[in-house]
Amino acid sequence: MYDVIIIGAGVTGSSIARQLSRYNASVCVLEKCEDVCEGTSKANSAIVHAGFDAAEGSLMAKMNVRGNELMGQLAEDLDIPFKRNGAMVVCIHKEAIDGLKTLYDRGIANGVKDLRILSREEALEMEPNLSDNVEGALYAPTSGIICPFMLNIAMAENAAVNGVDFRFNTKVEAIKRDEEGIWHLRTNNGEYTARYVVNAAGVYADIIHNMVSANKIKITPRRGDYCLLDKEVGGHVKHTIFPQPTNLGKGVLVSPTIHGNLIVGPTAVDLENKEGNNTTAAGIADLIAKANDHVKNLPMRKVITSFAGLRAHEANHEFIIKEVEDAPHFIDCAGIESPGLTSCPAIGEMVGGMLKEKMNLTEKENWISKRKGILNPQELSLEERNELIKKEPAYGQIICRCESISEGEILDAIHRPLGARSLDGVKRRTRAGMGRCQAGFCSPRVMEILHRELGLPLEEVTKSGGRSNIVIERTKGSNGGDEA
Amino acid sequence: MISYDIVIIGGGPAGLAAAVSARKSGIEKILILERDKELGGILNQCIHNGFGLHTFKEELTGPEYAYRFIEQVLEEKIEYKLNTMVMDISPDRVVTAMSREDGMYQIQAGAVILAMGCRERPRGALNIPGYRPAGIFSAGTAQRLVNIEGYMPGREVVILGSGDIGLIMARRMTLEGAKVKVVAELLPYSGGLKRNIVQCLNDFGIPLKLSHTVVDIEGKEHVTAVTIAEVGKDMKPIPGTEERYTCDTLLLSCGLIPENELSNKAGIQMNPVTSGPIVNESLETNIPGVFACGNVLHVHDLVDYVSEEATKAGANAAKFVQNGSKDTAKGHVVELKATDGARYTVPCTVDVDKMEDLLTVRFRVGAVFKDSFVSVYFDDERVQHLKKRILAPGEMEQVILQKKKLQEVKDLKTITIKIEAE
């Protein structure tokens, strides 16, 4: 039996897991997919929001601003890239200019620092590719960009190093509480028991919640399509450019990513299907049209991929983070839509604090707060790189030519705690396959490395677990051995 | 820093022919840098025949064709490094390379020949809507899996794009027992060679649907179905024309892109039409002593033309090493232009004083032309007018310019290639 079971290994679940790993408690994370960061956490704008959007006094506002504050130290501790590039909310209609002041006031009330309203001239000087129609902008220098994969992976990895168990491919099917108050979680991989349960199941948080409570909730998957553009045009804007918000959210943004690409999106379409993360022609057309309203000369010919993510939208547009009234020792983290990524360090802190108090948890003496990321040889000098290759020749072999990722980095990604087991796992940890050729060149090579390092037959090497195998069988003429 | 007279980036058909040619022109210190574990480049996975009809007057497979050149490289004892990635080329021709054995190191090159080839346009760049499951491959990646690794990606296949690799893979997958259900092509004509349409599709009863594209990909983990639809003149899908094919594999053969990341970093000027370097009559880029040939310069249809072009690049690089670095004065430079259906020319400029007696200018057309003329204009005067029964975007065309004809025209500024109806 565990002290705490967390359902879901996205940024929310992983942040809570890392926070709990500070304490003397047995903690387990159950994840239905084969890796962390497989749901909402993997497909979003990758923005660390300043916090002027959420309603004044809301939990969402509180978590956003606190999360933003915590992110700098967290990124440093976890050795992941993070940059406060600043955001601009751009007004292009004279009659809407007062809206900027409303946002400014809300931001100040929420505790956002250093907000400033810019004139048309100031805005254009800072960001020459803004639309010619710009009337003014709200500038938020604390807004930042981060890699959601690396954040999620690093938090989970650090939690695992500190003793948290992760169970992948483990889907919770039913939850019951026995007379002693112990929670029993039936999964496809047997039963798990715990004193406390944390529901961090993203778009499935309603299904998990509704297993234990008579007060039903509903989470609507709100799909957002995105386009990612080549690094060649990653400098088209330097800040994250938002339109003025509407009731459907923050609208279509244009932003550099932490890795130097340009991201455009998302759209907002409410769905029933919790797995409906397919892009649509209408969605892509819509986001291109909308992005062009605020940023001119968008080089859409330089798209290298498009994708869609599902936000876990709750009707009141508020985070639900609390113990469920009719289910003692069961804590919901539901409705964690944007700014969920920004808020995850704060949610971890809050839920960790709640559990510490309820369970009287004591701090570990030997908690490891820092995590060393996968070495990036591109940051080394020629001499340092040579030293490295002499010691570890695999760092001299480039596998992904677009992003210049070496075999050494891929081996590290596979063999570290909670290591990669699929092409997507390698991709999210190292960026191999994320460049402009989109893995056309490196996928057979990464498959071979996974096959060799994990002892998997090539037919069982997958894109992202389950039935996503890349090849199905040997060709007629091949000899069936390892070397064709 | 170690130094070589000529460093060649890429050991595929272009790099090999350039190396042999440079050696035959008298250059001793030549180094080929190849990122794969063997020489030959993409030819190694092209196990079908049909290579070398022009060069060797016989039909060879890809590996056989490559070996004809590898043999010469070995005989000539030209140095090469395998499993070596070039990380950077500087404007003063310092090449930074890296490998497991040698670490990261720099080479001062007297001349550099760019022969990096091209890559395939991926799904992402095509903005095809739908899910993003396993089972979607560029045709060349599938070709590598089948022909080099010996594994089948799937059993029921839809192919988008009728580029040559897609056509070849339609036949290859069929021969391996897969069912290729349809080849859809966005354009109203195929970008592949006529002979490949006949031999790879028609002979196997595989339908080719022109003016069609993929409008949906189904399958959360693995591809389960693909929907195609007809497109109108605006290239947009026509509602009501959708056809759904259950399948487990989608192959994409939607164009090749010269691989010029290194060239861009080095500050080499690019032609936006070809996505390859702008070169003069010597196949030299705007950086003196840096030459380009093969698919990195412009995408070729036949490897024979790659070898021919690379042979010239090798000889010109040799000349540069032997005396050219001193001989930088420009002569009478004429601009080459492609208009009226002709899309581009290689080279882009010609120095009348420096050109050889005959210069082959290669180009491609932007649409299918029947019973038309390829015309060459010296400024406003038409000097060549060649009747062609058919001109197609999939097949490279050429005209030959004579030095003495160019010299005859006083103050010649522009040579224009046009496609004319009469």
Image (cartoon, rainbow, N blue to C red):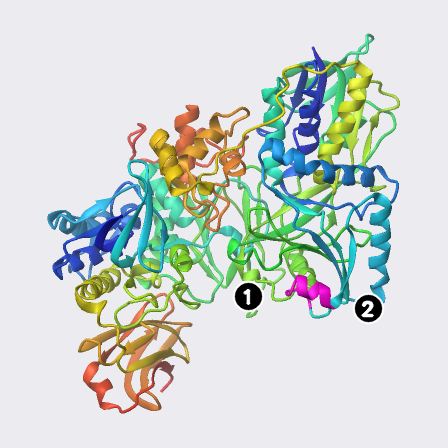
Q: Nearer the viewer, residue B164 or A198?
A: A198
Disc 1 packing (10 Å; few <14; some 14–19; many ≥20): some
Q: Residue at x 62, y 27 (%)?
A: A156
Q: Residue at x 40, y 37 (%)?
A: A384
- Height in image: B230 above or below A143? below
Marks 1/2 in contact by CB < 8 Å: the verdict is: no
Chain at tag 2: A
Please state, as top left, top right, bottom left or bottom right, where the C terminus of chain A lies in the image.
top left
Please name the residue that numbered disc 1 is placed on: B235
Tell me where residue A191 sits by quadrant. top right
- Height in image: A226 above or below A220? below
Disc 2 packing (10 Å; few <14; some 14–19; many ≥20): few
Q: Does any portion of residue A342 appear in the rendered image?
A: yes
Label tally: 2
Please name the residue that numbered disc 2 is placed on: A94
Please state, as top left, top right, bottom left or bottom right, where the N terminus of chain A lies in the image.
top right
Q: Nearer the viewer, residue A361 or B336?
A: A361
Q: Which residues are magenta?
A: A121-131
Q: Whole-percent x and y of residue B210?
A: 47, 63
Label 1 and label 2: CA atoms lie apart by 37 Å
Label 2 residue SS = helix
